[in-house]
Amino acid sequence: MPIQNKARFLKTVTKKKRNQARLNLSNKNIGTTLTLEEMKLKLSGLERSLINNRGNENCYFMAVSHQLYGTFKLHLQIKVMAEKELIENKEKYQEEFGDSKSLKKYVDKMICDDEFADARINLPMCQSQKVNLRTYLGYNHFETININAQKWVEITYVDRIHYVSVV
């Protein structure tokens, strides 16, 4: 096998292992989430529907972008602003990370385009965008971050790994 093919193969294997590790970690942290179809059914009872962004690792920021601007295209702007909020106000968020090295590692990882978001980015995103956030988790569970902003963003977490916009 030529060296370029080996490198490509190793990169693919490494990415698959990393994604599986993330999935395993999320399975431990979140006991249960609904599938996309189950969540559609649940929210239809509330006369709500979902807009699936198929955003891979950027799905969180794409869902927020859709809520704020009606398009998925501004997700990187939202991501950068949330990261900036984390860095500039690290003392406010330090408790979520344990120490400054952990927070710095998190921000360094989040800067990468293929890095998954997790709940630790919720408050910095809300502060940077000046919005409240409601995340539907299913089974009548949801998380709310209310910073007393006028605007609300509503997203849902499905399939233990994907965020979509609720309309």
Image: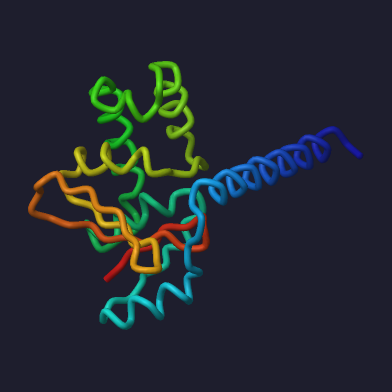
Question: Where is residue 27 shown, x and y percent of the image?
Answer: 56, 51
Q: Residue furthest right?
A: 1
Decide which of 122, 42 is in the foreground and name it. Answer: 42
- Residue drawn at x 64%, y 40% is 18
Question: Where is residue 122 shown, x and y percent of the image?
Answer: 31, 43
- Residue drawn at x 22%, y 48% is 145
Image quadrant assignment for residue 41: bottom left
Decide which of 114, 164 is in the foreground and name it. Answer: 164
Decide which of 133, 5 is in the foreground and name it. Answer: 133
Question: Where is residue 5 shown, x and y percent of the image?
Answer: 82, 40
Q: The N terminus appears in which quarter of the rendering?
A: top right
Question: Where is residue 16 shown, x and y percent of the image?
Answer: 69, 46
Horizontal side of residue 138 vs 35, given as left or right: left
Q: The C terminus appears in which quarter of the rendering?
A: bottom left
- Residue drawn at x 19%, y 39% is 127
Image quadrant assignment for residue 106: top left
- Residue drawn at x 8%, y 53% is 150
